[in-house]
Image: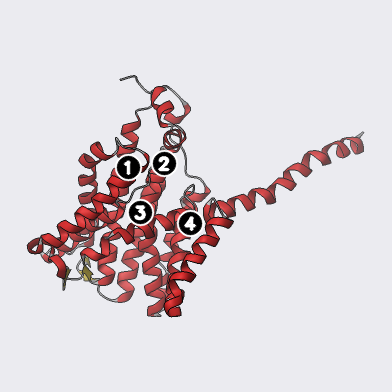
Amino acid sequence: MAPEPPMEARSPSRWGAQEWAAVAIFAAALAVPWATDDLLVHSIVNRVLIGAMAALSVFIMLRMDLLSFATPAFMALGGYAAVLLAMNGVTEVLLIVPASFLVPALVALPLGALVLRLRGVYFVLVTFVLTEILQLVLFMTPRLTGGADGLAGFPAPTLLGTELSDARSVLALAAAMALLAAAVTAALTAHFRQHFAAIEENEVLAESLGLVVWRYKAMGFVVAAGIAGMAGFSLGNMLLTVHPTSFGAQQAVDTIVYAIVGGRGSILGPVAGAALLVTASDFLGNQGQYAPGLFGLLLILVTLVARGGIAGAVAALARRRRAPRVAAAPAAAPGAARGGA
């Protein structure tokens, strides 16, 4: 195997404004539980945080031009792992949150050796089938997973002996996990920004230039699985149950839509997409039979008007606003020189 060339991509990239903004948004979400006691606000923010975490998992794979439908499967592994630990007496969040990350990540490690050989529609199809197979396994193992009844009535998580059972604590825990997920995603995608960009642009060319493509794809797949697992635990903690139907194909479609509508090229995309679409679905849900049509119309409108997603449209608008100022600066220089003469 040829060694990687001493290219600029070998040096770690620093966080940009988008990475810091994403982390700041989730850090600000930590204040929401104490800013209001409105349970509706708590519910919406909680679902936005869970959706954003799952979409961050999709975002990591999209950075390598891989569209993964396996996010719900890893969410299920993380959610069930955390709940089973709680039911066996381990309720400390400092233990069960790492477990919700590590269990799906460890499963993804050997799984990636098989599925990451595939590209394009074949990768999409296999990851979709994986989600369907795991959901079937959850239904068929009632002694372990509760089967069609799922798992409910498990102890609330605790932090250093303090029970986190009220709505405020549940939201605060979700915000803390989302902040951790954003920090991990930002660290990974910024550090290997040029590696992922080379793979996304032309995987064959990148490999021919000496980049060990499978290493970075496996790394992204494992981290994406772990982040999805934390989202699964957060979902179970909010619903007070984990059930196979919570981790089906529809969940995969939702998380992919969050990432693409928000903008696949920016870490702010999953945040913006989850915030818009979760809030919109909550509002349109009150419109009865018109809700699916209105929601679909919203998706079509966003994708037609902003091909780069919400984050891409905002970035393009900012560039257009800066362009006239940059062009005006050189034009003013000759006049200034004549005045000086």
Mark 3 or 2 closer to N-term?
2
- How far, Cα to Cα, is label 3 from label 2? 20 Å
Q: Which residue is mark 1?
A: 123
Q: Which residue is mark 4?
A: 261
Pick whichever, 119 or 224, lies toward us. Answer: 119
- How far, Cα to Cα, is label 4 from label 1? 21 Å
Front tag of 3 and 2: 2
Total marks placed: 4
Disc 1 residue type (three-letter): Phe
Mark 3 or 4 closer to N-term?
3
Query: Residue placed farthest to the left in the image?
Result: 143
Residue 140 horizontal/vertical position (percent): 12, 60
Residue 236 horizontal/vertical position (percent): 25, 66
Disc 3 residue type (three-letter): Ala
Pick whichever, 243 or 137, lies toward us. Answer: 137
Q: Which residue is mark 3?
A: 181
Which quadrant holds the C terminus? top right
Front tag of 1 and 3: 1
Looking at the image, residue 165 lies above or below residue 80:
below
Q: Which residue is mark 2?
A: 65
